[in-house]
Amino acid sequence: MAQKSTPRLSEVAKLADVSPGLVSRVLNGDPNLKIRQETRERVLSAIEMLQYTPHASARALRSSLTGLLGFALHHVNDPIYAQMVETAQVAAAAHDYSIVLLNSDELAGRPEAFRELVRGHRVDGLLIQSGFSSDSRALGEMARSVPSLVFNANATPGIRTLRLDDATAAAVATRHLMDLGHTDIAFVGAEGASSDRRHRGHVDALAERGLASHPMISGGWDAESAREATHRYYANGGRATGLVVVTTTSALGVHAGVISSGLTIPDDVSMVSIHDTWFAPHLNPALTVVAMPLAQVGRLAVEILLEQIDGQRDGETILDEPQPFIVERASTAGPRVRAG
């Protein structure tokens, strides 16, 4: 007979329809916890139903928690992720945690810095941003060394991952351009899993309507390299009248690259980027984007990371609700009819 598995705190939380952090505070008799009596009774009933008993070693570990969660981002000042970080901070504070921003490239490139972080028990859990490079080995080793959640990565055995529905977002952008009448549409992408998923969604959307895909324009994740790649593309005779850009930070450069090529937006080239952010409406012309639920990612990331602290497990979560949607601004229009 198979031995019955020991119930986990996250299972209690799911049954009671509350967060793992709230269950923990009920168990520990937190005097500052203010919840409705019916919620408390629901938690206690779930504990009784599952016969959940906190493991002694887990209690010992909890007593030495730092109260800090590390968010290791590739570019901590990237405005794309400002909303995600803000909502994560709010969610963490609700569980009596604070967030420390870290640079994932530095941690991956300086093993001694990561060892100091882990061995010194500086953080209780780590959100690691991936998806920007084909070499994710160092990030994978980091994720297996401390309770972690890897954001943007593909599903990976032994690692807990969370990502957005990138393929759908790029398909939405591509269909928007096709609906306007564009048939020559190129994808401005970068290196890494996130770009690969978005490129695949772009290509599949074109195939739905019998259109061939252009070779990907390798613009990178920053504005400067995207500007250079876009200018080079049109200087070498590129004829795409529509561009789908991997992210709005890159789109800053694409926007400038189109204009420096002597073309106009949207008369000569229409462009749509993935992700909305504060500066997109202030470009001239304002940038059409596909909005993604980054605010929800921040909250969900904290919830999953707290579950990982309670007990590590692998598995993939794809945040596909709310679905990606077009925010139409002035950078898209129907293609100009070419003379001749």
Image (cartoon, rainbow, N blue to C red):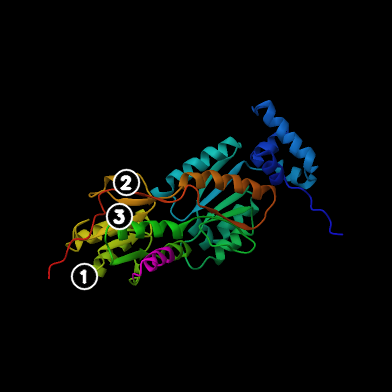
Residue nearest the observer in this picture, 76 or 155? 155
Labels 1 and 3: the sequence-earlier one = 1
Label 1 neighbourhood size at 10 Å, few (<14), some (14-19), many (20+)?
few
Classify residue 61 by image quadrant.
top right
Query: Residues at badges 2 and 3 in contact (C-beta under 8 Å)?
Result: yes
Q: Which residue is mark 1?
A: 235
Dot 1: element: helix
Dividing the picture into quadrants, the one containing residue 229 is bottom left
Mark 1 vs 2, N-terminal side: 1
Please tell me which residue lies in front, 50 or 70: 50
Q: Which residue is mark 3?
A: 252
Local packing at callout 2 (Cα closer than 10 Å; few below 14, some 14-19, many 20+) is some
**Where does residue 153 sit, x and y in percent of width and height?**
53, 60
Q: Please say if 94 is above or below 229.
A: above
Q: Between disc 2 and disc 3, whose residue precedes?
A: 3
Q: Which residue sits at x=55%, y=61%?
A: 139
Kind of residue indicated by mark 3: Leu
Residue ranking furthest to the right: 1
Q: Could you tell me the amino acid type at mark 2?
A: Phe
Residue placed under numbered mark 2 in the picture? 279
Segment tinted magenta in the rendering? 200-211
Of residues 250 and 188, the one nearer the viewer is 188
When asked about the image quadrant of residue 314, the answer is bottom right
- The spot of residue 264 in percent (x, y) is 19, 58
Image x and y of residue 235, in percent: 21, 70
- The kind of residue on which mark 1 rests is Ala
